[in-house]
Image (spheres, rainbow, N blue to C red):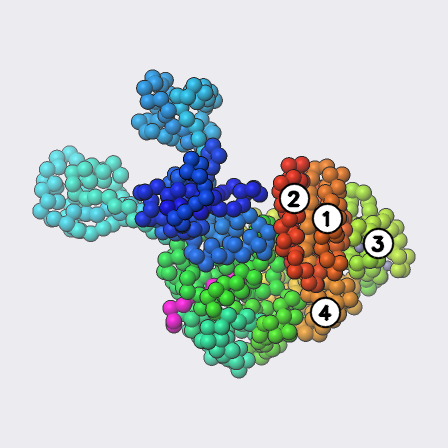
Amino acid sequence: MYAEVIVDVAAYPIDRPFDYSVPESYQALIESGCRVKVPFGNRQVLGFVTAIKEETDVPIDKQKPIAELLDIEPVLTQEMLALTKWMKRHTLCYEIDALQVILPSALRAKYEKVLRIADEDFDFPPEIRALFHQKQSVELKVDESKELLLIIKKLVKEDKLILETSVKQKTAVKKVRMVRIESDKNKLTAIYESISKQAKKQKDVLEWMIDRAGTRVLSTELLKLLDTSNAILQEVIKKGAATIEMEEVYRDPYADRTINPSSKLALTNEQQSALNEVLHSYEAHEAKTFLLHGITGSGKTEVYLQAIERALMDQKEAIVLVPEISLTPQMTNRFKERFGSLVAVLHSGLSTGEKYDEWRKIKRGEVKVVVGARSAVFAPFQNIGLIILDEEHESTYKQDDTPRYHARDIGIWRSEYHQCPVILGSATPSLESFARAKKGNYTLLTLSKRPKEQALPEVTVIDMREQLKNGNRSMFSLELAEAIRLRLDKQEQIVLFLNRRGHSSFVLCRDCGTVVECPNCDISMTYHRHQERIKCHYCGEESQVPNTCPECNSEHIRFFGTGTQKVEEEIAKYFPTARVLRMDVDTTRKKGAHEQILKQFGDGKADILLGTQMIAKGLDFPNITLVGVLSADTTLHLADFRAAEKTFQLLTQVSGRAGRHDKEGKVIVQTYTPEHYAIQFAQNHDFVPFYNQEMMNRKQFAYPPFTYVVLIQFTHEDVLMTAEYAHKAANWLRGNLSSGADIIGPSASSISRLQNRYRYQCLIKYKKEPELPEILQQLTRMYRTDWMKKGILMSIDLNPSSIM
Ligand code: ADP
Ligand code: ZN
Ligand code: ZN
């Protein structure tokens, strides 16, 4: 018997299954989907069995056996094995990368250095004998003393010891110690009698045990209850009064939270007809994709909940994806409130162990609903009835590291496998999805009203150019400052949103709002501080930073970008009594920090919540009556063709934070370009007109969804090497792709240098290119076999979420 094994070595010639013989002892146990330890070269690595077969082409003298079977039950289902093959082709990743990404990190390969005795008869020095402590092999830790490491090194050289790298098999399962008390009361009494009077503490324990003969108690609990020590307990156990049993338990990240159960709401007509359509396709076992377009607060979640409830009636399972779960604890709770312990939560804030426990509950079918961020789309359910992506437009659904998969694509793939519907929900769908819905590839469902017909908040747009003209140089317009003061007086809460992303900066005229754009690409030029130049990273156009505005000749032209700390200082200056909470990457590094800040704000411990992108989502507090957007322009002038779309989405999302409950909400948006259509349409919460306008622009410049885009990025420490290989690739592509494909660049990326590596990129824009997967695979092969050795790193991103 032979097993095809994908080994944990990410390198080009190895990206295929290898045949290993299966030792007699494993033959009845092994299945595809199990993890194994196999010899590879001169070491042992982790591998995944992808098939079992009776024959192999490997000659008998070259055959190697599997060293160890790591799972009795496969960790990967047949579905997952098929999915990884699909991912390999469609994201151009190594199969092993795809296999690893779908498993919880507890099951991924970890390696350790293991020391074994080679020569049994050798008289080892005492420190070595102490190290082994009568064991045959021990893990070698790097923090051993230098002297000891030197002795080991010498003995390894002399073949007395063997040092090898081995796959680490941590038992990620958490176990607790249970004390099982002897059930025979007479025996306990006899033991009690036999203990001398001096050992009073032991006698106390036994007395307590006699009353509880035959029961089990948590060891830690017993010690606490009786105020006794483990040594005493051990003595009693030695005498036969009890035994210790290890019991498997789950770590429960929600243990300390109280959840109030909720029951289903009577749906509005719009909700009901959306639900009916979904249920119709659910009952017909159709793999249909729905786009649920509903304004903020229109009750999309209630539709999800009731659709899931239907699937649960058939013992089927549901996956619910949310963009960033630590930012949306309120959303998670709604699923727990409705479905209680049937819900598992998977997200990046959990420890490795906690994640593994949730994963096992899913695998064993002990839960039926999983709520989680991107990677939860791989939840190992085997009988899926429904898949939901909430806020489907969010770019966090695309993994920006290999394998570069989009959770939407995986969700749709799985829906076809399970023949079940998918719901993509959003108040601001991505252009791609809305276009697909219009074409009929997806089925559009619309919620145009809030359930109690609450009005959407009023949005006021402030022209910051006017403020400057009137002598106001602060970052708060008079209107915003006034509105803040009013809320502070009334003790209502304020959210201030600083629209800021990454390192990008652009050059803006504060008098007329002009932003310097590339003449060829309709994309903002990026400011490069070091060279004092502006560049189009898209086509390579570059020039000096102008001293005066090309439109109005003003000298108030400068690069733009403000940090949250600076805003905090300004708040302290203008509103000294205000209590401020700041939420940005700096204040949320620690695990659980998001939730804590949100909780403090929810408990009324601050007047102003100041933050970046991360506060745009999920906030739902009744006392927020003002949302201020300090600078709508930052995303608007991103060097990216999705700039307008992202601005519209953000403004709509943040506006949705105000006045969700009884108190009326107000939104103030500050901008230097109030006439921009993204801001105009966001002001009126008008998605469809925005969509129509934006589609016209995309069409004119042949951007998605009218074309597809592939972003290919190159990095190297040497700028000339980077440019050379970027050119090589671009030329090669020009020679191999059809004339219908447009290859743009290469040019410097908008972040032109990162961690000491220069960055170049080129883009492929195409409408139809049937050979593309093969051509990109060939390019990848050239890269992996040759260019990589020269220190070049190349990444290929199909349908990138951003081209920066
Ligand atoms: P969305 O997900 O579209 O932003 P939510 O599902 O959060 O909207 O709903 C907004 C609010 O409306 C929530 O407080 C929810 O409980 C309430 N709600 C939803 N559907 C109904 C309904 N049919 N009747 C009454 N209230 C509803
Ligand atoms: Zn100007
Ligand atoms: Zn350009």
Q: Which residue is label 4 attached to? A: 695
Cβ atoms under marks 4 and 2 closer than 8 Å: no
Q: Which residue is label 3 attached to? A: 557
Mark 2, Cα crowd under 10 Å, few <14 / some 14-19 / many 20+, is: some
Q: Which mark is residue 732?
A: 1
Mark 1, Cα crowd under 10 Å, few <14 / some 14-19 / many 20+, is: few
Q: Which mark is residue 449?
A: none
Q: Nearer the viewer, residue 135 or 195?
A: 135
Residue 802: in sight, yes or no? no
The residue drawn where x is 32% and y is 29% is 135
Q: Which comes before the other along the chain, label 4 or label 2?
A: 4
Q: Which comes before the other along the chain, label 2 or label 1?
A: 1
- Give the side of residue 193 with respect to residue 327, left or right: left
Residue type (three-letter) at the residue carrying disc 4: Met
Q: CA distance from mark 2 to mark 1?
A: 11 Å
Mark 4, Cα crowd under 10 Å, few <14 / some 14-19 / many 20+, is: some
Q: CA distance from mark 4 to mark 1?
A: 32 Å
Residues in magenta? 313-323
Helix, strand, or loop for circle 2? helix
Residue type (three-letter) at the residue carrying disc 1: Trp
| Magenta span includes 449 | no
Q: Which residue is label 2 attached to? A: 782
The image quadrant in which ligand 3 is located: bottom right
Q: CA distance from mark 4 to mark 2?
A: 37 Å
